[in-house]
Image: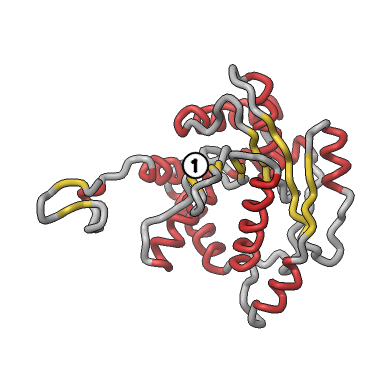
Amino acid sequence: MEHLEQVTKKLHRAVGEAIKQYTLLEDGDRIMVCLSGGKDSYTMLNMLLYFQKVAPISFEIIAVNLDQKQPGFPEEVLPNYLSALGVEYKIIEKNTYKVVIEKTPEGKTTCSLCSRLRRGTLYEAAKDLGCNKLALGHHRNDIIETFLLNFFFAGKLESMPPKFKNDAGDLVVLRPLALCKESDIEVYSEHMNFPIIPCNLCGSQENLQRKKVKQMIADWESDFPDRSSVMMNALQNVYPSHLLDRKIYDFENLEEVL
């Protein structure tokens, strides 16, 4: 395993690059950091706290956790951790567990509905807390997997951008870990010994299609090391005129549709 100092430098570099490339942070921001209790969100919080200290701008952070009332959820873990860290935080209590269990047919994964309910609640909370930005813990692997899932199963070229506006247009959503490798986050998380809270809403079930795509990428990586970096570069290097979407390219007049 890499030393903590090495992997921390890698993550600082990747997050710093994302901040620079996509203008994630600006002076006066108040950012709601969504904390699930998993390795990704703990890492994201640490990265943003680091840049809060070293960046030449001033921005506020408030950590928010949504207690979805899953049976056995350890309510004290995050408040204890965040209090010890000295971070402003808020725990939102909403029984989305009951809704998800009632609405999801037996044998189907609960992740999709759970995610939608959680996202809506968090958007509302961000506005209530006076935040202009909301940060999610998706990393590079999540972005590539989502792109391939959409490509193979949903029939669209779409992934997770490092920065976007919500549908209402009143909140900017950030993914500060967008350029970070999951393997680096795992090593960092082990070194930091974060108090991980497993997602047991659905018995930690994982979407079967995502699992297959994850395995496919892992197989590619073993045959062609750093294939994920190539795919990530491809997502940042798009030529609309060399695709087939008439909404973004006018093939009649051979020019981009503005």
Taking 125 as reference, is 156 above or below it?
A: below
Residue 162 shown left or right of residue 88 in the figure: left
- Counting from the top left corner in percent of width and height, residue 80 is at 88, 42
Which residue lies under the disc numbered 1? 163
Which x, y percent locates residue 198? 76, 56
Find residue 165 and report its horizontal and vertical position in percent: 49, 46
Q: Quadrant of residue 26?
A: top right
Vertical position of residue 15 compared to residue 104: above or below: above
Query: Along the horizontal axis of the image, is 9 left or right of 214?
Result: right
User: How many tags in the picture?
Assistant: 1
Name the residue located 72 percent from the left edge and 41 percent from the top edge.
Answer: 42
Quadrant of the rendered structure where residue 48 is?
Answer: top right
Which residue appears farthest toward the left when viewing the image? 253
Q: Nearer the viewer, residue 119 or 7?
A: 119
Name the residue: 47% across, 46% down.
161
Q: Position of residue 68 (x, y in %)?
A: 76, 61
Nearer to the camera, 58 or 146 = 58
Q: Give the color scheme: rainbow, by chain, secondary structure or one colour.
A: secondary structure
Residue that protrudes farthest toward the bottom in the picture: 106
Which residue: 37% across, 66% down? 155
Label 1 element class: strand
Q: Nearer the viewer, residue 157 or 126?
A: 126
| In-image side of 88 versus 251 (left or right) | right
Where, quadrant-wise, is the N terminus in this rendering?
top right
User: Does residue 158 appear anywhere in the picture?
Assistant: yes
**Mark 1 is on which residue type?**
Lys
Residue found at x 66% / y 32%: 47
Q: Quadrant of residue 66?
A: bottom right
Q: Is residue 50 above or below residue 258?
A: above
**From what the image shows, is residue 212 above or below residue 172?**
below
